[in-house]
Amino acid sequence: MQRIDSIDRLLNYREGCSGSVGLVPTMGALHAGHLSLVDAAKDVNDNVVVSIFVNPTQFDKDSDLAHYPNTLAADLEQLASVGVDAVFLPDFAMMYPDNFQYQVTETSLSQLYCGAHRPGHFDGVLSVVMKLFNLVKPDQAYFGEKDYQQLNLIKGMVEAFFLDIQIVSCPIIRETDGLAMSSRNLRLTAIERKIAPQLYAILMSDSSLSDKKQQLISIGFDVDYLEVMDGRLLAAASLGDIRLIDNVPYPSVGVN
Ligand code: PAF
């Protein structure tokens, strides 16, 4: 696996690729969810590139950025062991030579749900993803359905800017107790970790949206939103400092 830490080396690597290129953008602290994206990319591409970059412009809270888990050594080992061809490890100066003066902004969906609670979040996400697309020039790029709003905004950006990239969405990977895998789960305390799977259980339960909200609050969640989008129930709720998001088919009764 090539470890690429400059834009020049990335462009060189890309020029030398023959056949198709699949890109899996990540912020590191990799888990089985990320590896499922890598697997999907490897299934159909001749070359698979994973980027690891904790993108500061998408964090609305400095403390969230400061505490974002960093497991780089383990991440690199995992990626090498599953046969990733190249890992791109940029830093802020490389990705933002303009210091974020230029931004990709979506003005409608990005203002709802997570966007309403995390001002500027999706400007940061869309801007960095556009930069990664322009640098890696992938044929396909892989994103998890856990970040359902993000996934839809990226699909919309690709259409709006006529990018010749296929966005492949991959299903949510869950722990055995139902908790959607997320790098932030590493930061839950032991007590919070026991409560966390209830988010999924309550979303899937046969109850009204207001009952679900009350149930979540009663067990200690601070609920940002529960909203239905395109036949899915989207939720964001925090336990202490840790904000969890999840989504399930809606109505979910009768669906596993
Ligand atoms: O989903 C993520 O991990 C990030 O939002 C992404 C797509 C890698 C952009 O920084």
Image (cartoon, grey):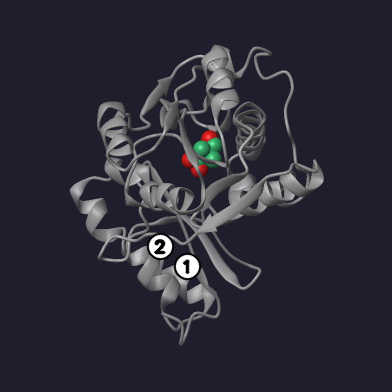
User: Mark 1: which amino acid?
Assistant: Lys
Q: In the image, residue 124 lies at what x, y percent?
A: 62, 32
Residue of label 1: 213
Label 2 CB sits under 8 Å from any ligand 1 atom: no
Which residue is nearer to you in this view: 47 or 110? 47
Q: In the image, residue 126 lies at what x, y percent?
A: 65, 37
Does 208 sit above or below residue 6? Answer: below
Q: Mark 2 near mark 1, Cβ–Cβ under 8 Å? A: yes
Q: Secondary structure at mark 2?
A: helix
Q: In the image, residue 239 lies at what x, y percent?
A: 35, 50
Q: Which mark is residue 175?
A: none
Res 81 quadrant in image: top left
Which residue is nearer to you in this view: 160 or 238? 160
> Residue placed at 58% from the left, 42% from the top?
20
Q: Is residue 13 left or right of residue 99?
A: left
Does 207 sit above or below residue 53? Answer: below
> Residue placed at 65% from the left, 14% from the top?
99
> Residue placed at 38% from the left, 64% from the top?
199
Which residue is nearer to you in this view: 7 or 212? 7
Q: Which mark is residue 217?
A: 2
> Residue placed at 80% from the left, 43% from the top?
162
Q: Is residue 91 left or right of residue 84?
A: right
Visible residue check, residue 106: yes
